[in-house]
Image (cartoon, grey):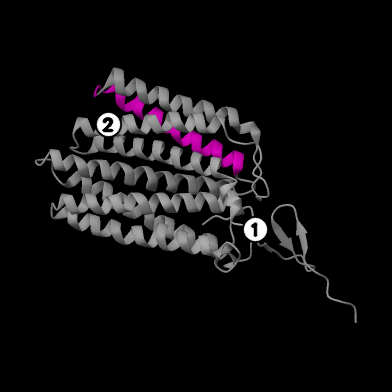
Amino acid sequence: MPPAASPRVVPTGLIVSPQGRRYTRAVPAQQIASNLAYINWTVLTGLAVGAYGVALLTRWRTAATPGFVRFTTICALAFGVLAWFSDGALPGSLGESPVVADADFDGPRRAALALFVVLGAIDLIALRNRPIGRYVGSAALGAGVLVLMFGALAWGSGSSVGLLLQLAVLSAATGGVFAAMILGHWYLVTPKLPEAPLVLVSRLLLAVIAVQVALFAIWVATGAGPAQVAPFAALTGSWAFFVWMRLIIGLIFPLIVSYAAIQTARTRSMESATGLLYINVGTIAAGTILAAGLYFGAGLLV
């Protein structure tokens, strides 16, 4: 009886069995560290686009103070500048990752980042609360969305739609919780500010995290991502520790804390709400880092 054929290792970081089944091989955890530049880009871009979106929302739809809107916009544009510099330093290859970078979208992505910062600065400095500012601000946010789109096209590796969804919800969560934390601070110096703005932002944050939990379940159940692993294999493979940390620390815990922040904000316990949002900044940022590391390091959408 001939000996059983051994699995065949392929350069993409996967194993292909003799029957043709593909699954994640044991890749060292250092693979995440080797792609820190892409993780850094994801965090900075998410902070920029997400925080700017919240600034626009509270500016035109709530009674948030102009000081909060200006400060949050300045922070968002500063993150955008850092993201632009980060983009220019991205390596052309992701090593053993299943993700293959397409350099054709580097120029459009960097141009969209620059446009985001320039339009946001024009609105902030020259237009302020003038009616035309609504259109310029919306155009700046549109440029931010283009940044995410070009990033998804460049690094999608056959999963561009999934990566675009991932980048969008990561931006909404990371930038959203940062802006919510700043807004919580504003109540400490503006006691008469109504609770509606913080309640609204906290509810939207809760909804975004709930969407992330749903996407996590769908992607794990279908083995989504460039790695093309078997359904639920991400929960037991060599990357399982990071996947479970993404779920527990980056999704479930922030979901609970966000709900608690809404309840405390509704009762005007603003110090407690701000403290809870502080916790969420750390856990959501950690979840974003894990999600980006798992995608760029292992080709997993989670």
Nearest to N terminus: mark 1 or mark 2: 1
The amino acid type found where label 1 is placed reads Val
- Does the magenta portion include 150? yes
Q: Which residue is mark 1?
A: 27
In magenta, the rendered stretch is 129-155
On screen, 24 above or below 145?
below
**Front position among marks 1 and 2:** 1
**Residue positioned most to the left:** 192
User: Under tag 2, what secondary structure?
Assistant: helix
Considering every residue shown, the one lying at the far top of the view is 126
Give SS at disc 1.
loop
| Picture residue at 65% right of the left edge, 33% below the top | 103
From the viewer's perspective, is residue 183 above or below residue 278? Answer: above
Q: Main secondary structure of the magenta part?
A: helix
Q: Where does residue 20 sit, x and y in percent of width and height?
A: 76, 65
| Disc 1 + disc 2, Cβ < 8 Å | no
Residue 214 in the image: state x and y as whole percent. 44, 60
Q: Quadrant of residue 236?
A: bottom right
How far apart are the two marked residues, 1 and 2, measured between alpha carbons? 42 Å
- The residue pinned by badge 2 equals 71
Q: Position of residue 241 (x, y in %)?
A: 52, 64
Seen at 55% across and 38% down, the residue is 151
229 versus 146 height, above or below = below
Q: Residue furthest right?
A: 1
Q: Residues within 10 Å of mark 1 (few under 14, many from 20)?
A: some
Asked if residue 171 lies in the magenta stretch, the reply is no
> Does residue 299 appear in this view?
no
Is residue 300 visible to the viewer in this orientation of the structure? yes
Residue 13 located left or right of residue 290: right
Left or right: 300, with 181 as reference point? right
Say whether residue 31 is left or right of residue 181.
Answer: right
